[in-house]
Image (tube, rainbow, N blue to C red):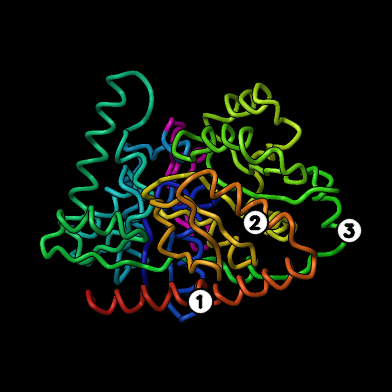
Amino acid sequence: MKIAFFMEAYLEQSSGVQTLACTMAKGLRALGHTVLIVSGDPHAEESYLDGSILHCPAKASASSFGFSARRGRISQLKPFLEEFSPDLIQIMTYSEIGEAGINFAQQHQIPFIAVLHDLRDVRTGIPGNFLTQKITHSYFQNVFHKAVASAAAVAATSPVLCREASGLQPNGHVVQLPLCADSSRFRLRSSSKDGNENMRRWLHLEKKIGVLFVGRLDEESGLSELLDEWAKQISKAGNLQLIIAGDGPDAPALREKAKLAGIADQVTFAGQIPHHEIAQCYDICSAYVSASLSSTMKTPPVEAMCCGLPVILRKGCANESMIQEGQNGFIYSTFHELADLLKTLSSLDARTTGRMKELVSAASKDFTEDSLAHALADLYQTVI
């Protein structure tokens, strides 16, 4: 089967949607399907095909991807798409590229499915002045509603999004997809000693136990509240180091908060770590933690579990449904509970920590691109 994914950005893999699409494409290709990625390129003046990626000229914007396709150049995609002749189209973002995919599918009578993962832009529009945000919010909402209402099938990675979209879908049925990780990158392993030691020094973990967060540094991350509570309840543990990997609009304010709270020496702001290198961070840390209450399923907790890290999440977040309490992680309702969990983990000896990582990894053995690809293939069969 030939499938075309439509999404604003792909190569950088700096967002959950991009990482999800990469994992989907890898799994589907392993099953024998052909996948074409249709995406934007802010450096291009003309549309072009590079291997399995069809690029559309884009311009810089304040969207969650950093750029948006140039509407006047979208028509250039048509001859490439007609030559590829997809059997199915998969819409993954709900702006210019997503709309182009819907229009092509409807004009050529090709079934399309809508995959819902991160709807940040749909919910808020592009930040800026009032008029810009209002116009973009209205546009993204229209594309999203059009996609969900007219798709042959709708799928989502979060039970929250499934419920949200079911009211917009004519038959009210939304398929929940498993959120998985690339098993070739994210698995329990022992990296080279030299590589581990270099990473430990960089993250200030020579004599400390690493507690990791990976993601966008924004209000939704819950990091502001986590830093407050770290200063109040967790800092006294002494041997814990909070590693924050990622970037975003709240990064400067979070750095300043850590300084003012007197915990700057217990928090390492690692910045945006390339996706192909982040596995080494999972390797050398002892737990993954998040205070987010987001309705979007996040990929880093899944990657962490596959690497053997117990994941500690806040009750009410979308990823809560993935946690098998005591097997691959823990759920906390209060920050006092979080503090107790972290203090317990920090008291474990190396042998117990290693055994725990083995158990977490074993409990997460099905979170692979193969599982995701089979779920997608089953969904495709219902619409082809």
In depth, the one of 351 and 91 nearer the eye is: 351
In depth, the one of 50 and 112 nearer the eye is: 112
User: Dot 3, how many residues are within 10 Å of its Cα: few (below 14), some (14-19), or many (20+)?
Assistant: few
Residue drawn at x 49%, y 73% as measured from the top left:
27
Residue drawn at x 54%, y 51% as measured from the top left:
13
Q: Which residues are magenta?
A: 41-62
Residue 132 shown in magenta? no
Q: CA distance from mark 2 to mark 1?
A: 20 Å
What's the residue type where badge 1 is placed?
Asp
Residue drawn at x 55%, y 68% as measured from the top left:
326
Report which residue position mark 1 lands on: 366
What's the residue type where badge 2 is placed?
Ala
Residue 31 % position (x, y): 46, 81
The residue at the far right in this view is: 194
Horizontally, residue 242 falls left or right of residue 74, namely right
In depth, the one of 294 and 249 nearer the eye is: 294
Report which residue position mark 3 lands on: 194
State which tag comes first along the sequence, 2 or 1: 2
Q: CA distance from mark 3 to mark 2?
A: 22 Å
User: Dot 1, how many residues are within 10 Å of its Cα: few (below 14), some (14-19), or many (20+)?
Assistant: some
What's the residue type where badge 3 is placed?
Asp
